[in-house]
Image (cartoon, rainbow, N blue to C red):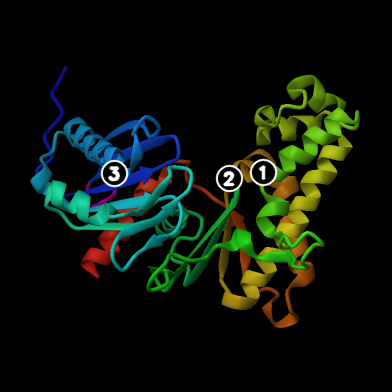
Amino acid sequence: MSKKKKTTGRVWIGFDLGGTKMLAKVFNDDFETLGKAKQKTHGAKGAKSGLKRMVSVIEEALKDADVDADQIAGIGVGCPGPINPEIGEIVEAPNLGWRNVPVEAHLGDAFDAQVVICNDVDAGVFAEYYEGAARDARCAVGIFPGTGIGGGAVMDGKLLQGSKLSCMEIGHIPLFPETSGDGEDGTTLEMECSRLKIASEAARAAYRGLAPNLLKTCGTDISAITSGKLADAIESGDVEIENIVRRAAVLLGCGVATVIHLMSPDVIVLGGGLVEAMPDLYLRTVKESTADRVLAPYKGTYKIVAAQLEDDAGVMGAAAWAKRKIEG
């Protein structure tokens, strides 16, 4: 067996700081993968331990790629939660319990390299702009319904970011903003359209005997009700499940129409398990709902498409964004 030829040129590191795993990839200038490594996120006790583990994962990826640290041209990191792009800190990552964590400074010192962080959804959207469904769009918006609803945007080749915080928190667009009698805020897009909300409504329907196929495969366990299981139940004839998914897609279309009126994007990319599992039902319903709500001048100015890249494309997007920021 021939030995892999050692890479002698510069490389870029893409890093995804996920809620359950850390993934690092080493890319060449053409963004071909040279090596990778991953570890579990949980188990790192606190931010200090987590930063040490991030360094360890990058070191493993470099070893897998057979490159040296001094070949690193830049490191891009996709981080959960809002980040401060000005100082390179995670402001808050609730799932990790991290606050005000200096990711750029720590990794920069560890590898003597330039580091650029962004929100993890932003990284995924930039990947779709750079190499996927929104390639070369002037204004691309990505919306990813999952446990919550993440959003991001690329305008003229640059991620849309505030000076102090990452932005595009699409999931928090109010749908029914009236304050209830107990003083709680009204309903947001995320509260009504996320997969978690759909799974909760589907479990209730199964419990009430309105979704016999879903009840047979998943019972009423919300954690077992995946996008694929929802699609299977609809295919098997659970009309109530189809109604639940369709309602969520209609309401998401309200959010998409709002974004169109605000930004006039030429491409809106929808990604995540719901889109992958039900590309016809879900995507078509979002398109129809959006078209019903946009003002006449905006009709025909945009297209809504499914994401093309795989789940770990965010590491490539993070690396590509770092390259764009560092090289200008």
Residue 88 placement (x, y as % from top left) = 29, 61
In the rendered image, which quarter is residue 74 located in? bottom left
SS assignment for the magenta stretch, majority: loop
Name the residue that disc number 1 marks: 195
Name the residue that disc number 2 marks: 272
Q: Residues within 10 Å of mark 2 (few under 14, many from 20)?
A: many
Q: Residue at x 85, y 45 (%)?
A: 243
Kind of element beneath mark 2: loop
Q: Look at label 2 and name its amino acid.
A: Gly
**In magenta stretch: residue 220:** no
The one of 320 and 219 positioned closer to us in this rendering? 219
Q: Residue at x 79, y 30 (%)?
A: 233
Which residues are drawn in magenta?
A: 28-33
Q: Residue at x 52, y 65 (%)?
A: 168
Q: Name the mark nearer the viewer: 1 or 2.
A: 1
- The N terminus, quarter of image: top left
Q: CA distance from mark 3 to mark 1?
A: 33 Å
Label whose residue precedes the other's in the sequence (1 or 2): 1
Q: Contact, CB < 8 Å: mark 3 with mark 1?
A: no
Name the residue that disc number 3 marks: 32
Taking the image as drawn, is residue 119 in sight? no
Q: Residue furthest right?
A: 209
Residue 4 placement (x, y as % from top left) = 15, 28
Label whose residue precedes the other's in the sequence (3 or 2): 3
**57 left or right of 263 in image:** left
